[in-house]
Image: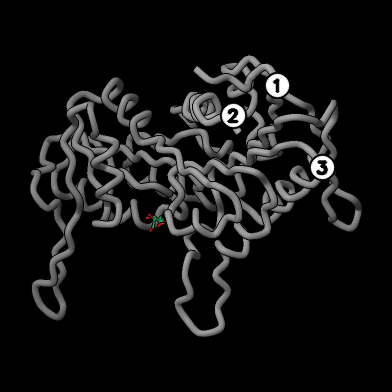
């Protein structure tokens, strides 16, 4: 096993401090302290305390513009070191192409500005974004961790992707845990009538887990959860990699009867039942700089 851990130092950005501490513990390497504050005019101030040299891994999700700027500041503060940026949730990844003339490809703009030696993301919304980075970029897959957790806490669940786009994720979550999975298919019956139901499996009386990579406003999942309840599902759980949970998404889901919202800890504000720390630690061990 290659190990860089004796010389590697970890920095936990403002948005990923718990996760960074967990990774540092697993790798048994130093966690550098950071100072973060805002000036009266709103500008952010970032300082890394301790010796900055050798190999540094900066762990920082970017769910907002402020967190992205903080990542830029951390990278700049580590000038001279060999830097791995671990960005568990990479914001703007959904803006990966130009839909209308004159639009910014925002994911590309965000990716291009990161001057580091290597990047890790986790279940990035669009793999296309990996090509926008100016250094080698690897997307780690948290699906097996979610699958392992779900197979332990829910008896005989059926994993349902809310649309065809999420079927691949449902398949990889089901993976080696032998879980059943399916997706919701929209069929137009007439100009006025649309039927939405699971493609192959019956949900009646079953414990359903709706799976998506991101739950943001909860809109996508909410409609699916209501429908599955109407179709006789016994319980509906929601599981995702990135619990963005904007605004009142959580209460919207719970008040619609969702039993539990399960996510990883790529974002700290969510009830991250499944930690991606081992995934990051293993990647750091296996792919030394
Ligand atoms: C979309 O392509 C994603 O996979 C998610 O389905 C989407 O981002 C969820 O967003 P929201 O929770 O706002 O419906």
Q: Which of marks 2 and 1 is nearer the N terminus?
A: 1
**Where residue 7 is drawn, which disc sits there?**
1
Q: What element carries label 2?
A: helix
Which quadrant is the C terminus positioned in? top right
Q: In this view, does 94 lie to the left or right of 184?
A: right
- Where does label 2 land, which residue? 19
Label 3 CA crowd tier, 10 Å (few <14, some 14–19, many 20+): some
Question: Which of the two marks, 2 or 1, is nearer to us in this view?
Answer: 1
Percent position (x, y) of residue 124? 46, 49
Query: Residue lying furthest right in this view?
Result: 40
Q: Earlier in the sequence, mark 3 or mark 1?
A: 1
Question: Which of the two marks, 2 or 3, is nearer to us in this view?
Answer: 3
Percent position (x, y) of residue 219? 39, 57
Label 2 CA crowd tier, 10 Å (few <14, some 14–19, many 20+): many
Q: Is residue 66 visible?
A: yes
Nearer the observer, 172 or 221:
172
Question: Which of the two marks, 3 or 1, is nearer to us in this view?
Answer: 1
Identify the residue shown where x is 10% and y is 40%.
Answer: 204
Q: Quadrant of residue 160?
A: top left
Q: Earlier in the sequence, mark 2 or mark 3?
A: 2
Identify the residue shown where x is 39% and y is 47%.
Answer: 213
Q: Is residue 242 visible?
A: no
Q: In this view, does 68 lie to the left or right of 241?
A: right
Nearer the observer, 267 or 95:
95
Reply above or below: 114 against 159. below
- Where does label 3 land, which residue? 77
Identify the residue shown where x is 45% and y is 38%.
Answer: 140
């Amino acid at each position: 096993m290659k190990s860089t851990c004796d010389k590697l130092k970890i920095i936990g950005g403002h948005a990923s401090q718990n996760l960074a501490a967990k990774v540092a513990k697993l790798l048994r390497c130093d966690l550098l302290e950071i100072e973060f504050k805002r000036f009266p005019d709103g500008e952010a101030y970032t300082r890394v305390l301790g010796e900055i040299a050798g190999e540094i891994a900066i762990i920082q999700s970017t769910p907002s513009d402020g967190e992205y700027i903080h990542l830029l500041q951390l990278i700049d503060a580590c000038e001279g070191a060999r830097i791995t940026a671990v960005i568990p949730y990479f914001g703007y990844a959904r803006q990966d192409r130009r839909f209308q003339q004159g639009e910014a490809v925002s994911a590309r703009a965000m990716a291009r500005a990161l001057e580091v030696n290597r990047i890790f993301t986790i279940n990035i919304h669009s793999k296309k974004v990996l090509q926008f980075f100016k250094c080698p970029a690897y997307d780690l897959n948290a699906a097996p961790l979610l699958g392992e957790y779900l197979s332990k806490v829910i008896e005989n669940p059926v994993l349902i992707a809310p649309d065809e786009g999420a079927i691949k994720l449902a398949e990889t979550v089901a993976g080696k845990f032998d879980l059943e999975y399916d997706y919701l298919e929209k069929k137009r019956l007439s100009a006025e009538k649309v039927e939405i139901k699971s493609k192959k499996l019956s949900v009646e009386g079953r414990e359903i887990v709706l799976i998506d990579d991101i739950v943001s406003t909860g809109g996508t999942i909410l409609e699916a959860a209501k429908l599955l309840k109407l179709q006789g599902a016994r319980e509906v759980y929601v599981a995702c990699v990135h619990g963005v949970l904007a605004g009142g998404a959580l209460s919207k889901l719970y008040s619609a009867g969702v039993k539990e919202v399960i996510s990883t800890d790529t974002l700290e504000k969510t009830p991250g039942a499944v930690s991606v720390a081992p995934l990051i630690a293993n990647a750091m061990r296996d792919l030394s700089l």
